[in-house]
Amino acid sequence: MTDSGRTTQRRVLDAVQRLGLWQPGDTVCLAVSGGVDSMVLMHLMHRTQRAHGAQLSVVSIDHGLRAESGREVGMVEAAAIALNLPFHAVRLNLRPGPNLAERAREARQNALRAHGTDWIATGHHRDDQAETVLYHLLRGSGMRGLMGMRAKSGPWVRPLLFEPRTALQQWAEANGVEWSEDPSNAGSQRGTLRELMPRLDAVHGGASRALARSARLLASEDAWVEALVDDEWAALVDDSGLDRVALASRHPALQLRLLRRLVASTRVRAEPLESVVSGALMQGGRLDLGGGLVMVCSGGRLKVEAP
């Protein structure tokens, strides 16, 4: 193994242990698509298994949208078997149509959760983080969106999140790791953003590193803000809902956080919640939030209902 290979391996293992992504003995499902990032994830986690102590298994998902996807799952299976790792293939049989990317992501996540392990490890890396931050910036997201992905969130863990894609590809090449490129990535939103990164680097060198650093800083600040929201939530919310008058006396940023927690859905866009911050529902009434949800103000309390 080359010196750079040992450095990459050591950094990834340090991230697992320093961030407490899992504890020895925990079961970890490796989500492996066949791309360079997830294939490196599988090989690195296998090589360092004695040190991090997880019980590993591999899941590869065929969305059923491309003729090549079955071959890619077969490639992952062969690599997993060669490493003596338990392997499971899942075929989703998705149909083309509206919201395909969102439907595919939801189906993929449900399939991985159904595998029943303590943790689900994905191959997201630093460049993915930069693209996520840029995507959310273009959507007009606030701090929560701009902090990007966390190394540990719910059952999801991302051991490679601080590694650039170039380092992972170099490690794969140096260690004879086979991978496949998904041709559909080029036409996706992710693919388009990926093409922009070299241009951003030309404007400011190390753009992806800087965007990832911004995400880390915002994640730290978000944790502090959420502690404030916890205190306000305890003061303003009971079984009858959120106190509308007291809410209006809080800082607008804090109001929006409390409303997002009340809604507890990623399907709701910011605009209707911002209208509440601006004074909507002060005298009672109903507000369509979209996503099949309605906010109701009755007796001075705000609640969210499904019509």
Image (cartoon, rainbow, N blue to C red):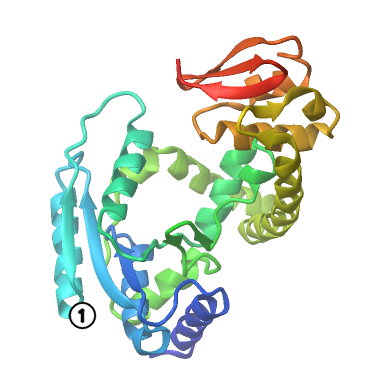
Would residue 230 be seen by someone viewing this image from the given angle?
yes
Query: Can you say whether 49 is above or below 79 in the image?
Result: below
Q: Name which residue lies at 71% across and 32% down.
A: 256
| Residue 87 horizontal/vertical position (percent) | 17, 67
| Residue 174 horizontal/vertical position (percent) | 36, 81
Q: Name which residue lies at 75% across and 48% down.
A: 231
The one of 32 and 106 positioned closer to us in this rendering: 106
Label 1 CA crowd tier, 10 Å (few <14, some 14–19, many 20+): few
| Residue 213 horizontal/vertical position (percent) | 68, 61
Query: Can you say whether 179 is above or below 259 in the image?
Result: below
The C terminus, quarter of image: top left
Q: Quadrant of residue 89?
A: bottom left
Q: Name which residue lies at 44% across and 78% down.
A: 23
The N terminus, quarter of image: bottom left
**Is 9 situated left or right of 237 in this image?**
left
Q: Quadrant of residue 99?
A: top left
Q: Which residue is mark 1?
A: 83
Query: Can you say whether 70 is above or below 5 in the image?
Result: above
Check disc 1 and give the amino acid type: Leu
The one of 291 and 197 positioned closer to us in this rendering: 291
Q: Name which residue lies at 33% across and 82% down.
A: 175
Q: Quadrant of residue 39?
A: bottom left
| Residue 230 horizontal/vertical position (percent) | 70, 48
Would residue 178 be seen by someone viewing this image from the given angle?
no
Q: How many marks?
A: 1
Q: Secondary structure at mark 1?
A: loop
**Is 259 situated left or right of 123 in this image?**
right
